[in-house]
Image: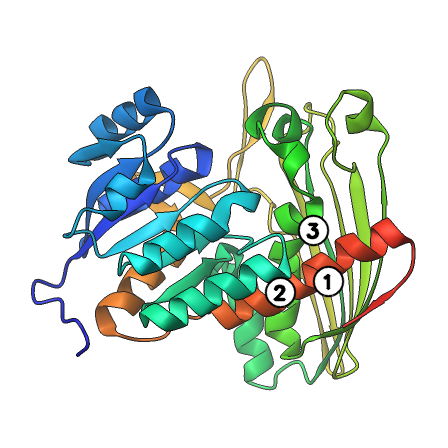
Amino acid sequence: MAKTYADGVLKYGVIGAGTHGENHLKCTSAANNAELVAIADLNVSRARAMAAKYGAREVFEDYHDLLAVDEIEAVSVVLPDHLHRQVCEDAFVADKHVLVEKPMATSVEDAEAIVAAQKAAGKTLMVNWSNRWMHAFAQTKDALDAGELGDPLYCYARLNNTLFVPRQMLSWSGDTRLPFWLICHRYDIARWYFKSEAKRVNAVCRSVKLKGEGIDTPDFYQATVEFENGCVGNFESCWIMPESMPSIVDSKFELICTDGYVNIDAALPDFVLATNEKQLNKGVLYGEVMGEPVGFVNQSIKHFINSVLLGQEPMITGHDGLMITKALVAMVESADKGEPVDL
């Protein structure tokens, strides 16, 4: 029998209290239909600080202890890319709904295991490709679905980070690759627009800058993806942009259609704030307004909460996560082998 939520409030836990984990804590604690019950993180002192800040009642070092709390109905899994599988599987065994941060996994085997666990549990699974809730991407999707642009044919997508990310923000940057960290965002958008799966992937990467600093991950990837319906996507990402850039994110997305064209700079600032030290492109993509979280991250988390409470399938499912993982793995494989990969 399907669970009902009589009080209309989802009891919530967050596994991972790092940089992006705090965004999940902030958004769930501010939601009027969710209650932040507990946080789990190996860094207990940080978890306690986050609990005090966002009102979580319990803190755990071991995520198994969080999953053992019966009243918790759903969890966010906000851990390094390569650590998602076991935690998601354990969450489903514990009868929890799961919002897992992108990418769902860094191997096809892990993605398949997560989907199998979700199906066995009969719970909700959403992969948090939150960029779908950015205004420009969402409005472009509406225009495509309304037939205003004709049929999509080709996209060019660039998403870069400054050196701050692999050097300082991520202690585990050497354990991931840019297709999983950045390209996945734009590949998800392209697949969403094209309504098709990858057929052939041809990718290249180079390792110079970060390798010289002892960080074992490539500086950039470029991937050309041919889709089953004939659409083509060109995806590129690097994370060696200078830290003097006004934003840690550099973004560009162009879409060519039979009857239209779209040009999106997702990182374009709503306003520029400059101090004596640096120019900052603050924008309103995410953050706070009058103390309340706003923007695409907040919208995606709210969508997951609403999907669970209403018993509806979320916009981004485990199947989506699996199919995207297959394409991302193919990008890494193609660049490693120096030849195209057919899916």
Q: Which residue is mark 2?
A: 324
Upstream in sequence: badge 2 or badge 3: 3
Using residue 189 as the reference point, say whether residue 47 is left or right of it.
left
Which numbered marker is on residue 33?
none
Q: Which residue is mark 1?
A: 254
Image position of 282 with respect to 167: above or below: below
Number of residues whose C-alpha sits closer than 10 Å to that of mark 3, classed few (under 14), some (14–19) or many (20 or more): many
Q: Secondary structure at mark 2?
A: helix
Between the C-alphas of marks 2 and 3, the distance is: 10 Å
Q: Residue at x 60, y 51 (%)?
A: 266
Toward the viewer: 147 or 235? 235
SS at circle 3: helix
What percent of the width, then of the height, locates residue 256? 76, 72
Quadrant hosting residue 255: bottom right
Are circles 2 and 1 on residues that touch, CB within 8 Å? Answer: no
Would you name the residue on which mark 3 appears? 179
Q: How far apart are the two marked residues, 3 and 1, measured between alpha carbons?
A: 19 Å
Amino acid carrying mark 2 in the image: Ile
Residues at circles 2 and 3 in contact by the CB criterion of under 8 Å: no
Task: Compare marks 3 and 1 and give the one earlier in the sequence.
Answer: 3
The quarter of the picture where the N terminus appears is bottom left
Q: Residues within 10 Å of mark 1 (few under 14, many from 20)?
A: some
- x and y percentages locating residue 300 in the rendered image: 40, 57
- Relative to 25, does residue 117 appear above or below in the rendering? below
Judging depth in this view, the residue of 95 and 269 nearest the camera is 95
Q: Residues within 10 Å of mark 2 (few under 14, many from 20)?
A: many
Which element is circle 1 on?
A: strand
> In percent of the image, x 59 and y 14: which residue is there?
277
Q: Earlier in the sequence, mark 2 or mark 1?
A: 1
Alpha-carbon distance for marks 2 and 1?
A: 20 Å
Residue shown at the point (44%, 70%) measured from the top left: 315
